[in-house]
Image (spheres, rainbow, N blue to C red):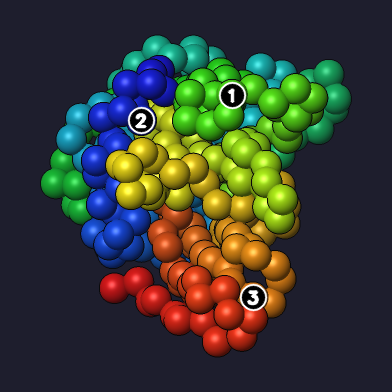
Amino acid sequence: MVSGVRFFTSLRMLLSAAMLLPGALRAETAVFHHKQWQAHCGPEYCTLTPRAYPVLSLMRGHESGDWVLSFRDRAMVDEGAILIDGVAMGWQQDRAMAFPTPLLDGNTLEIAYESEGFSEGVSLAGIKAAMLWAEEQQGRMGTRRLMLHQPDWEALQAEARKITEEMCDGPLPGVLDNEAGPQEIEGRPEVRVLSQLCWTAAYNVGSQVYLLGPELDGVAPVRLAAVDPEGAAEPELALWGIEGDTRVLDSFYKGRGLGDCFTHETWRFDGFAYRLERRIVDDACDEKIIPMITWPE
């Protein structure tokens, strides 16, 4: 697992520059659509998901590594049996294997919960076409191995807390102990978004927000840290409590009061990371609601 301290320290220079130039880290994503399956390729890896019922994902990095099969939650593997066309696969977690041909040649993948007497599944029609497209995007045609892996969201949440405690005011009694867990991002079972309280002030509460699992067991801050005049990292703006559509995040900071000076940021999930879509700033504090709008490049 990535060390929170090493991760954040090594990125501080890059992150600071990115806030000054919102388009600096922007990377194009490519999308393949099939009736049943879709594939996305971003700057670091490609991912395949069923379109109608995205309870699982296949992902692989561009440079190295195997295809990783993850399900929406750990219970799907711990409590259910993986079947393809009624045949149990018996795959062992975190053990690389030759790519199972039934996954590409089968019709239906099911998770059967024998004790509960029901199953849930997805069609495998189109997965081969999506994978061939992703392999072409990566320049890694026909190089296939597979590993079944479920991210440990609690461990990643603890890793994010370490970063929060080092960047911010330290642990806030009664707050972090009751924080919400990582939130699902619609249609993307391999990632979660997490908000953790960082500071409180007269008009605002500020949070650090993290994307968990963008690569295998990874932790990455969503809003790239700004820098104050002394060169110290400034924490997340006032984004506290992620609810509803997690594909779009809003950060609103009141400089003196509602309707006066403020900063409003909108971040949109592009399938791999949150990108700054819009930033509206009014720092005049002149009691006039006429903000200067800064659009990302």
- According to the image, label 1 marks what residue? 170
In percent of width and height, residue 100 lies at 38, 27
Report the disc number at residue 260. 3
Q: Residue 78: x, y in percent?
A: 66, 17
User: What is the CA distance from the residue labelled 1 to the residue labelled 2?
Assistant: 16 Å
* The one of 265 and 200 positioned closer to us in this rendering: 200
Disc 3 to disc 2, how far (Cα)?
33 Å
Task: Check disc 3 and give the amino acid type.
Answer: Asp
Residue 251 drawn at (x, y percent): 58, 59
**Which residue is found at the position 50% from the left and 71% from the top?**
283
> Closest to the observer: 157 or 94?
157
In this view, the mark in front (3 or 2): 3
Quarter of the figure with the C terminus? bottom left
In the figure, 113 relative to 212: above or below?
above
Residue kind at label 2, given as amino acid type: Phe
Mark 2 is surrounded, within 10 Å at the Cα level, by few (under 14), some (14 to 19) or many (20 or more) other residues, namely: some
Q: Which label lies toward us, 1 or 2?
A: 1
Residue that mark 2 sits on: 8
Q: Element type at marker 1?
A: loop
Residue at image position (69%, 26%) is 172
Residue drawn where x is 55% and y is 87% of the image: 290
In which quadrant will I find the N terminus?
Answer: top left
Badge 1 or badge 3: first in the primary sequence: 1
- Please name which of the two marks, 1 or 3, marks the residue nearer to the observer: 3
Nearest the viewer among 35 and 183 is: 183
State whether residue 36 is above or below residue 99: below
Q: Amino acid at mark 1?
A: Gly
Q: Is residue 246 visible?
A: yes
Say what secondary structure mark 2 lies in: helix
Mark 1, Cα crowd under 10 Å, few <14 / some 14-19 / many 20+, is some
